[in-house]
Amino acid sequence: MEANVLIESRLLLQPEARQGMNFRYRGRTAIIAATTAIALLACGESQTPGSQQPAVPKAAEGADEASTEGISIMSLPEQLVFARKDLAEARRVESDAVKVLESRPVAWRSGALGCPEPGMMYTDALVPGVLIRLQIEGEVVVYHARVGGKPFVCPIERAELPIYDESSDQL
């Protein structure tokens, strides 16, 4: 046993002996690197000759624009137009028959946007949003949305009061 330890310690101290050992490790490293490179090439997507992948994904190209493919961001006036048109289509009347009672930016108390569904859990943080109150044939219909989001009808029995913007005298 002592002899093996002595031989191993001499190998570690003698540069000539280490050269042979390094060759073995360098050979293993080269084999592992070559195998990894082949595996990565095999996993890549095949392309026809002359075709190139875009350097930037499509979503990132238009990231600085107001809307990107599949995502639509609405301004408050656009949200109001959408809500009026949605209600008019649901009731099968002209958009002119829908009267706007209120349309204003608010802060919703949670991710439920002031319209929690029973049994669901929501983030407990203020969410910037929009409250739109419309009237049709004497009935008040309330739409809620997050800033830039698509407005949706919130049934009166589920509606929660928002925190209004600072310029408002309502709470």
Image (tube, helix red, strand yellow):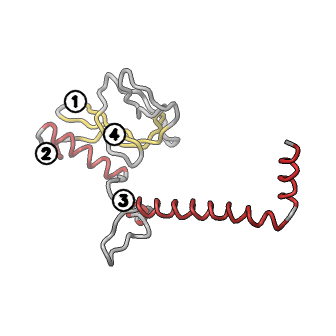
Among numbered discs 2 and 1, the one appearing first in the sequence = 2
Q: Position of residue 92 (x, y in %)?
A: 11, 40
Q: Position of residue 81 (x, y in %)?
A: 27, 49
Instruction: Using a 10 Å C-alpha cutoff, classify the residue at mark 4 as few (fewer than 14 neighbours), some (14 to 19) or many (20 or more).
Output: many
Q: Residue at x 83, y 58 (%)?
A: 11
User: What is the spatial separation of the Cα atoms under label 4 and label 2, in whole angstroms?
Assistant: 18 Å
Give the amino acid type for the residue marked by disc 4 in the picture: Ile
Give the amino acid type for the residue marked by disc 1 in the picture: Glu
Specify the label residue 139 is tagged with: 1
User: What is the spatial separation of the Cα atoms under label 4 and label 1, in whole angstroms?
Assistant: 14 Å
Residue 29: name its quadrant.
bottom right
User: What is the spatial separation of the Cα atoms under label 3 and label 1, in whole angstroms?
Assistant: 36 Å
The kind of secondary structure element at disc 2 is: loop
Residue 68: name its quadrant.
bottom left
Label 3 with label 2: CB-CB less than 8 Å: no
For the residue pair 59 and 20, the one nearer the viewer reads as 20
Q: Residue furthest left?
A: 92
